[in-house]
Amino acid sequence: MKKVYLLLLVGMSIVIIGASCSMYPPAPAPAPVTPTPPTSEQPAPVVTPTPQVVPPTQPPVVIPPKTTSAKADVSIANFSFSPATITINKGMTVVWTNNDSAPHQIASDNGTFNSNPLSNGDSFAFTFSTPGTFTYHCAIHPSMTGTVIVK
């Protein structure tokens, strides 16, 4: 008798489960996936522009600096001018600086330029606007001589 109850219980369970499953409609089937045929077209490549270097057809124009702003230095030390002879372009300025402990005074031999007495550390400047050769000396120590050549 136990077997009958057991069979009856199992049978009833199957009926109940089957009835509950039939209460809900079946889930819809997923839509069929249609494979896309391969295409012969490939995506366009990404083009990165490269800067183009164009060589110049003519050399660049170089504008020289104005000679009026250029300067040349002459040092006064050990009772001499250094350099003793200097060559410059027209329009350049020569700057004499006294690096001696004694005072010195620049004087051109033809009177074109003359300085006041220069103490240690003092300077005198003169701009040469005409070509030529200009000799000079120290008015305090006449054995000290120098030359400026202006082209």
Image (tube, rainbow, N blue to C red):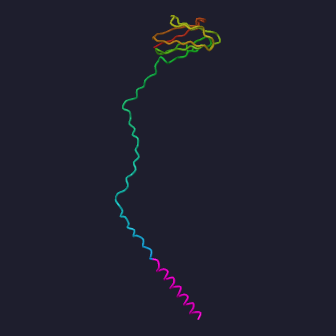
Image point 63% across, 9% down: which residue? 103
Residue lying furthest bottom in this view?
A: 1
Quadrant for the C terminus in the image: top left
Horizontal relation, residue 113 to residue 101: left or right? left
The residue shown at (37%, 53%) is 44
Above-or-below relation of 17 to 33: below
Predominant SS along the magenta part: helix
Magenta range: 1-24
Residue 54 location, x and y as percent?
A: 38, 36
The image quadrant of residue 1 is bottom right
Total numbered labels placed on residues in the image: 0
Q: Which of 123 and 102 is in front in this view?
A: 123
**Rendered residue at 57%/90% (across/down):** 6
- x and y percentages locating residue 41 in the rendered image: 35, 57
Asked if the magenta segment contains residue 9, the reply would be yes
Please report the residue visible at 48 percent of the width from the left and 9 percent of the height from the top: 133
Which percent across, then down, holds residue 23? Answer: 47, 79
Determine whether 31 is above or below 8 in the image. Answer: above
Q: Magenta stretch containing residue 88, yes or no?
A: no
